[in-house]
Image: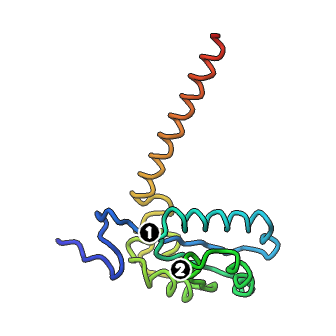
Amino acid sequence: ARAPPPSPGRPPRSSPQARIYSVVDVGGLALSNLNAHTFSFLTTASEVMNNYYPERVVKIAIVNAPWWFAGSWSGIKGMLPAAVTDKVTISGVGAGALKQALLEDIDVDELPREYAAMCELEDAERLLPLGRHPDEVALDRIFRIKEEGEESEEEDEEGAAESE
């Protein structure tokens, strides 16, 4: 059986021009969580995406947003680059809002099990759990190898310093 063609706007999986689609789940976020640390993180993350990956970021979907979030977003948006904020969509709480936000751009088979269940999709159990997609597992493996290499370099440096 042939694989279906990629969805419109998305390159094939083998494309060297991979794209980033971020889902930011703000379910359970309280107004008190919006503090200087939050704004610093958002500003830094936006600068990194805007400066290093401007053409790779396709969309940032903020999901499960509480009723007050849209008003807060108006203030936050002014502190971030337009190249980033123009790619942001916000959806409220509930299966209908989540389904509309995610399934517009993501194939059902690519959704993590937890989000498929929140969207009340049938057969959600057949999908991979969050963090277990082969691409995520491979990326995690790369970071672990890098961390292990850095740890062994630090041990080598410590050993050299002790022997002097």
SS label for mark 2:
loop
Q: Is residue 17 left or right of residue 75?
A: left
Kindly indicate the quadrant of the structure image that contains residue 12. Answer: bottom left
**Nearer to us in this view, 43 or 37:** 43
Give the vertical position of 44 relative to 101 (above or below): above
Colouring scheme applied when the structure was drawn: rainbow
What's the residue type where badge 2 is placed? Lys
Q: Residue 67 at what x, y percent from top left?
A: 72, 87
Considering every residue shown, the one lying at the far right of the view is 32
Q: Position of residue 144 (x, y in %)?
A: 50, 42
Alpha carbon distance from label 1 to label 2: 11 Å
Q: Earlier in the sequence, mark 1 or mark 2?
A: 1
The residue lying toward the viewer, choosing from 121 and 27, is 27
| Mark 1: few/some/many CA within 10 Å (<14, 14-19, 20+) | some
Q: Quadrant of the N terminus?
A: bottom left
Quarter occupied by the C terminus: top right
Residue 66 point in image, percent of width and height? 70, 83
Of 118 and 91, the residue lying toward us: 91
In the rendered view, tell whether residue 38 sits above or below residue 146: below
Q: Which residue is mark 1?
A: 56
Count numbered badges in the picture: 2
Say which amino acid is labelled 1: Arg
Which residue is drawn at the image coordinates 70% and 75% (left, top)? 79
Report which residue position mark 2 lands on.
87
Identify the residue at image location x=50%, y=87%.
100
Side of 38 relative to 105 (left or right): right
Q: Quadrant of residue 161?
A: top right
Secondary structure beneath label 1: loop
